[in-house]
Amino acid sequence: MPDLHKLYETACFLFDMDGTIYLGDKLLPGARELVDYLNETGKPYYFLTNNSSKSRQDYVEKLGRFGLPIPAEHIFSSGEATAIYLNKHYSGAAVYLVGTPSLEIEFKRHDIRLVQDKPDVAVLGFDTTLTYKKLWNLCEYVREGLPFIATHPDINCPTETGYMPDIGAMLALVTTSTGREPDVIVGKPFVPIIEAIIEKTGFSAEKLTMVGDRLYTDIAMGQAGISTVLVLSGEAKKGDIPVAPHKPDFVIEDVAELLGLLQAE
């Protein structure tokens, strides 16, 4: 049994969603009961997702369909973090965005000026409405040398039936075509989203615990001093851990097991 001291000292939990709380349209075991427990005990928590294809309100509605009435303020995505980053570092800039209508809504909520022509900054999100024309335009702007920002690095997004290509697959195409990597990736496990979530929660990194299913995003948050819990209900499998550069503090089957550990404190 691992030393649970770090887990019990957590001041605020951060939960990934895809592969951790739900898989596609299926709520994973223990998720509802865990949220109920955290609400009853008054333990702060936030849902922290790299999936930038949906707006904060989309997630409120999806979680609501699962019977989880989560306030919008408790949901934080790489899309919102990217909008915050743009306002901080490129205030007033014209932005060419490759993203879903939901991500456009999220950007406009933060007063980001979106344009099709003559942008100052090029941004790639997880675009499930992707067209060849959007990618072509993005590659042209990246080739011109515009600042190039990606919302997150995830290669695949887990679903009930397997995986769908995520932004990382799109980034590979853009990089192959242009020879450029993004100048900044905002989402987990990178600095911009860590700074944003520390500011949002009001807790230092050492007081946070990230619970998620991806070794290279969720668990890599441990680099910043955040405690990490790997759930095996999504992308990562136990056999992936020995070769992963970043090791989790705890490994559990799912959030139902996490609930059991917290109740046993």
Image (spheres, rainbow, N blue to C red):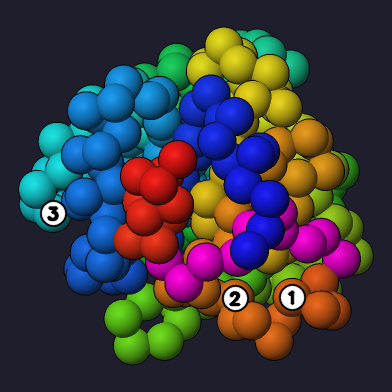
Q: Does residue 96 lie above or below 150 as drawn? A: above
**Type of amino acid under label 1:** Ile
Circle 2 packing at 10 Å, graded few (<14), some (14-19), many (20+), is some
State whether residue 10 appears in this view.
yes
Give the percent coordinates (x, y) of residue 20: 42, 61
Which of these two is toward me, 71 or 95? 71
- Image coords of residue 112 (percent x, y): 50, 21
Q: Are marks 1 and 3 in contact (CB under 8 Å)?
A: no
Kind of residue at disc 2: Ala
Q: Which residues are magenta?
A: 245-255
Name above or below for residue 148 compared with residue 75: below
Q: Are marks 1 and 2 in contact (CB under 8 Å)?
A: yes
- For label 1, the residue is 241
Q: CA distance from mark 1 to mark 2?
A: 8 Å
At x 36%, y 55%, the residue is: 260
Q: How crowded is the residue under tag 3: few (<14 C-alpha within 10 Å), some, or many (20+)?
A: some
Q: Residue 241 magenta-drawn?
A: no
Residue 127 versus residue 3: which sits nearer the camera? 3
SS of the residue under disc 2: loop
Between discs 2 and 3, the one toward the N terminus: 3
Q: Is residue 246 magenta?
A: yes
Query: Which secondary structure dominates the residues rendered in magenta?
Result: loop
The part of the image, by quadrant, that contains residue 8 is: top right
Give the number of marks: 3
Q: Residue 19: x, y in percent?
A: 42, 66
- Quadrant showing the N terminus: bottom right
